[in-house]
Every structure is written in structure tokens, then in C-alpha cells.
Image (tube, rainbow, N blue to C red):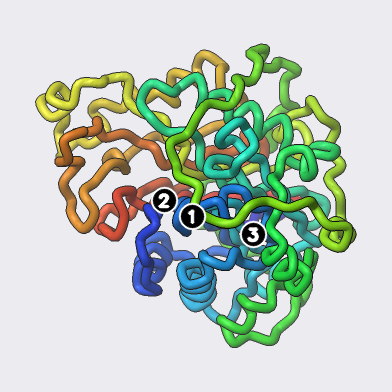
Amino acid sequence: MLTVHVGAVTWNVAEQAILAEDVGEIAAAMGATKLQMLFVTAQELVPVSVGTIAGGLAPGGYYENEEPNTVVWDAAWAEAVGREWRQVRAASFGGVRVNVFARHDLAVGPSTVDAVACGIGNFLNNKGAAAIRTSIGSTSFLFVGAHLNAHAKKVQRRNADFRRIDANLFARDSLFKNLAYPSKRRQQRFETTGFSTTDDESAESASASSKSNAGAFSEEANDGIPSVREGAPPSAEDDSEEDAEGLEDDEDDDDETRLDWSASFAAQLQTPPQRQSGTRLVDTHDRVVFAGDLNYRLTMTDRDAFDALYDAEHPTTLAHLDELKHQRSARAAFHRYEEAPLAFPPTYKFDIGSHAYDTSPKKRVPSWTDRVLFSTDGLAVYEYDSVNHLTRSDHRPVYAKFAILVE
């Protein structure tokens, strides 16, 4: 057994034009270059339109109207980690972007991507998840970036979103069952970018690196980092609640219509999903990291009460009211996942460009909507924090750092 140091970042950028400096600040705050592997996911990276929410998975390529922000995102992360790193894989699904980077001396296996829609009618991808599956040695890794349904009273819908993702990611035929059909123009873009199980060329260009994957990773000293134990085999317990049906969404559709899935696009699927339907992600992957804007709120709905009780010097005073903790305890969602203790202020909703929580007429109750969870076997988290000084969005970025055992 060897230990790999892995980071995970999630940030809902609220459709704002991000700068390379934003990404650089996140990377510096978490010490990304000291790690060996990095998973980053963004939500609302592009404006919601029919061109994105009715489009299929864009594995490594871009939707036409998302290029500026996504190119900045990819290139900024490549620059932030430096030339000793390469991009393993990237994909977009609606407003969700997922990227995995690794050091050149880390032997990462072939990768595949998949996605599940949880938006309108469980068909459109204004909400949903994208994922990258890969391996190191004989240990399989799954990185999931998700954006679950919003609004304070939709906790059961969020639970259903998780169960839908858990049941369908990389399940047999899930790619065709859950993805909306891409437009003809996006189809042509896919035919250019294709499905690749090797390095992403755009990231290599951005990082000005021409090195290839060069073999086994180095075994470094872990001073100050907790040891990682091999967990017991997962129990056979399972959630028994059924998926909720898709609910309405108030996003406008203002772009092109969907066309039939083309044979030329389907033929590019090099590695079809192989997971049996009905199994769970933690049963079929050795190491799972699940991050994103999960949209779980506080059970407190009175903003005036929050303002009276919240103590900025002790920002987790109200963490016992966190919906996600309650749902996990009830095994309604994220059963058999863990999360490090919350030690940072609520990450949503801020006035953009400010450190003030929502001052709009809605006065939303601040919540920890942005989270990083993980499977329990072979992972130990040793840092979990937000980048609270970054005010570009109405969300704050959140990151976690892990020591992960691999065989």
C-alpha cells in the first residue's frame, strides 16, 4: 500500500466571468502544488440556456457558448499546478465542469466520463452530475461533481437527486438513458474532440507541458498527516426510498432545439459504462469523492433569527441545523459517505463582490451549500476549508485534502 495526496475543489461561480487570478488564489490557499492529484469541479460555469441544459455530455470539449469561462477555468488550473502536472480528463455537463489533474510521476490509468441529469423532468441538465472514473494501480477512483436542486423547501428533491446519481452513474446504458440529445452543431464539435482516455490536449497546451505519464508515483513522508486505515467492507444496508419525479424549473429556454443522437457520436464511446444498475457507487469503486453545490440548507428558515444567533467569530455555531447532516443521519442521502467537520462559515448566499450575506429582498438564510464528501474505505481527510476572501461569486469555493491508500 502507498499513499497518494489528493485535493478536491468545488465552486459555484454563479455565471460570473472568472479570472485566472481567482483560480490561482484557490490553488495557493490549499497548497495544490504539494499534492499529487487534484479534482476540481465548477457549477454555473456557463449561462443556462437550451444550448447547455438540453445538450449531452461534452467530454473534454466545450459547449459553444461556454468557451470563454471554461477555457479560462481549464487553463488557469493548468497554470496554477504547473508544468509538472497534466490534465487527466475533463468534461462538461450543463453548467457543471469536472477536471482531474495529476503529476507526471503519478501513474494514472485510463479514464472514462459519464453524467446524470436531475433537472426538469429528470431529463434536462440544468441540475445533475458529471463524473470522471480512473485508477491508480489496482485501485479505482471516482470523482463526482454535482449541482443538486435548489430552494429551501426542496430537501426531499435533493435526496432524490443524490439517489438518482448514485443509481445511474456508469450504470449499464445510463449514458443513453439519462443524457439529453446534443444539437447538430455540438455534435460536430464532439466529432472533433472525441472521447479520449489519454491526456487532454487543451490542458497540455495551456500548461506548456509535453511530458507523458512517466510511471509510478513517489512515496513521500507524511509528517503531520493522519494515517489511513483500510476500512471494513461496506455493509449491505441500502436506502429504501424511491426516486422523486422531476419537478418544474423556472429557467428559460432560449437556444437551439435538440436533434436525434447520431451514430457517428455514439460510435466514439470507447469504454461503455459497465456498472450493474441498482448497485451503489461506493460498492463499485474503491475510492469515491463527491463534491459540488449540493444545495442543502439550514433547517432554520427565519433570516432575522439567523442574524440574531450567528456568531462570525464562531462560524459553525449553527452547524447543528445543517440539512445534510440530518439527511445523512437518517440515511436518506449520502449514506456510507463521510465529511470532515465544518470549520468555516456558511458558503452561500453572499452579495457578489462583498462579504455580506444576502441583502436582497429575499434575504436567504446563509447555508453550507458547497460540500465535499467521500467514501470511508482508504481515505483520510486532513484539511477541509473554504476560501472565504474570494468574492467573485455568491458562493465561496470549498476544498478538501486527502491522504488516500492505493494498491
Where does the image place residue 101, in percent across and percent down from the top left? 61, 66
- Mark 3 — residue? 91
256 on left or right of 320: right
In terms of secondary structure, where does tag 3 sit? strand
Graded by Cα atoms within 10 Å as few (under 14), some (14 to 19) or many (20 or more), the crowding at tag 3 reads many
- Labels 1 and 2 touching (C-beta < 8 A): yes
Residue 42 marker: 1
The CA distance from mark 1 to mark 3 is: 11 Å
- Please report whichever mark, 1 or 2, sits nearer to the chain's N-terminal start: 2
Q: Which amino acid does label 3 sit on?
A: Ala
Say if residue 83 shows up in the picture.
Answer: yes
- Please report whichever mark, 1 or 3, sits nearer to the chain's N-terminal start: 1
The CA distance from mark 2 to mark 3 is: 16 Å
Q: Which residue occupies 61% across, 76% down?
A: 203
- Mark 2 — residue? 12
Where does the image place residue 249, in percent across and percent down from the top left? 47, 34
Q: Which amino acid does label 2 sit on?
A: Asn
200 on left or right of 171: left
Q: Which residue occupies 26% across, 57% down?
A: 391
Q: In which quarter of the image is residue 106?
A: bottom right
The CA distance from mark 1 to mark 2 is: 6 Å
Q: Which residue occupies 35% across, 50% down?
A: 386
Say if residue 320 shows up in the picture.
Answer: no
343 on left or right of 91: left
Q: Which of 51 and 150 is in front in this view?
A: 51
